[in-house]
């Protein structure tokens, strides 16, 4: 069934991800115009990194810490690439995304399987250059944050099938970057219910609603640069779709079509418009977004 989303829902859903030694902060960029794919990057918390590793922490409203990381990099030759869909590494290893420079996820490599945590279970990740974790052979540690001083993430299953026909377990969807650096099964969710775990919110990411953790909790009507800049229940949409947006994009509420415009009062001048142009997928028929009709 088609999942074509309304044209006003901003642009390309490019997933930019700040990373940590055992933690990542997901951000979904809305600053491009190609709606056909998502591109996943990892951004350092420092714009002028020193040659040694550093960490920088910040606290969210619920007391959970997230952190950025600038890894050491000695200029060594990158290891041979592998295929995450095929998982074509030697026995005892798995193919995972990693950063060859510490600045962004830019390739895949084989790493040893060091644990047996299954998809959906908690995990730890070394950093995006070493890229080892304690997940099992079919998953990778994702959405890692510092919680009470401990790095905690969740094992996400590798997508199976092919890039043209990806497969995931029930209740999840394949998040694929524009260059296929990231191909992971992320839990799906209901944007009207916001049924994700604490610290996560339900955002549109590539071709489904996925649980991605919030970063800045920007309120409705205020400028945003990444989809998960927005607070729980909001989405970063094109400024042209809103009556008074001071940036190229601003946060606006999801809304229930069956309830009318009640949820849109936070952004005066907007109405609840269907999120999907045509053929909304099952269970998403009532999903709308507050924009200028």
Image (tube, rainbow, N blue to C red):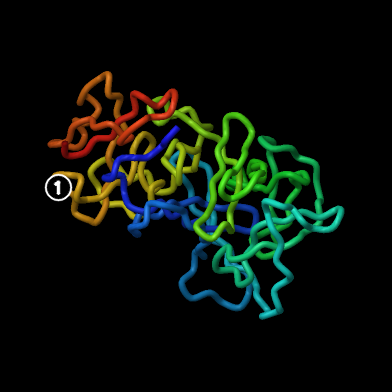
Closer-to-camera residue (246/140): 140
Closer-to-camera residue (189/149): 189
Q: Quadrant of the C terminus?
A: top left
- Residue at 56% in and 53% down: 24
Q: Is residue 88 above or below residue 218?
A: below
Give residue 225's quadrant in the image.
bottom left
Q: What residue occupies the far bottom of the structure in this picture?
A: 75
Where residue 164 appears, x then y in whole percent?
56, 48
Where residue 48 appears, x then y in whole percent?
48, 76
Where residue 205 appears, x then y in whole percent?
45, 44
202 displayed left or right of 256: right
Q: Quadrant of the N terminus?
A: top left
Tally of numbered tags: 1
Closer-to-camera residue (41/1): 1
- Residue at 64% in and 62% down: 98
- Residue at 76% in and 40% down: 117
Q: What residue occupies the far right of the structure in this picture?
A: 91
Closer-to-camera residue (63/231): 231
193 displayed left or right of 85: left
- Residue at 72% in and 56% down: 95
Give residue 204's quadrant in the image.
top left
Within-10-Å neighbours for mark 1: few <14, some 14–19, many 20+? some
- The residue where tag 1 is placed is 244
Q: Is residue 92 above or below residue 204?
A: below
Where residue 88 appears, x then y in whole percent?
77, 56
Q: What residue occupies the far top of the structure in this picture?
A: 258
């Amino acid at each position: 069934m088609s999942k074509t989303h309304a044209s006003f829902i901003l642009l390309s859903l490019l997933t930019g991800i700040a990373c940590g030694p055992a933690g990542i902060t997901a951000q979904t960029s809305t600053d491009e115009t190609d709606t056909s794919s998502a591109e996943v990057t990892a951004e350092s918390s420092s714009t002028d990194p020193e040659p040694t590793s550093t960490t920088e922490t910040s606290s969210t409203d619920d007391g959970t810490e997230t952190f950025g990381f600038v890894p050491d990099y000695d200029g060594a030759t990158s290891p041979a690439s592998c295929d995450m869909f095929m998982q074509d590494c030697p026995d005892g290893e798995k193919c995972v995304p990693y950063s060859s420079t510490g600045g962004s996820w830019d390739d895949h490599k084989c790493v040893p399987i060091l644990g047996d945590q299954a998809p959906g279970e908690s995990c730890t990740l070394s950093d995006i250059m070493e890229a080892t974790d304690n997940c099992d052979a079919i998953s990778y540690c994702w959405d890692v944050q510092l919680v009470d001083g401990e790095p905690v993430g969740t094992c996400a299953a590798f997508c199976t099938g092919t890039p043209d026909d990806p497969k995931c377990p029930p209740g999840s969807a394949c998040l694929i970057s524009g260059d296929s650096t990231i191909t992971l099964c992320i839990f799906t969710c209901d944007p009207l219910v916001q049924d994700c775990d604490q610290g996560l919110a339900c955002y549109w990411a590539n071709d489904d609603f996925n649980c991605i953790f919030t970063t800045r909790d920007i309120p409705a009507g205020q400028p945003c640069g990444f989809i998960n800049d927005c607070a729980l229940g909001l989405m970063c949409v094109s400024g042209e779709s809103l009556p008074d947006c001071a940036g190229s994009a601003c946060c606006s509420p999801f809304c229930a079509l069956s309830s009318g415009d009640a949820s849109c009062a936070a952004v005066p001048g907007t109405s609840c418009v269907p999120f999907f142009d045509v053929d909304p997928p099952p269970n998403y028929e009532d999903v709308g977004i507050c924009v200028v009709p």
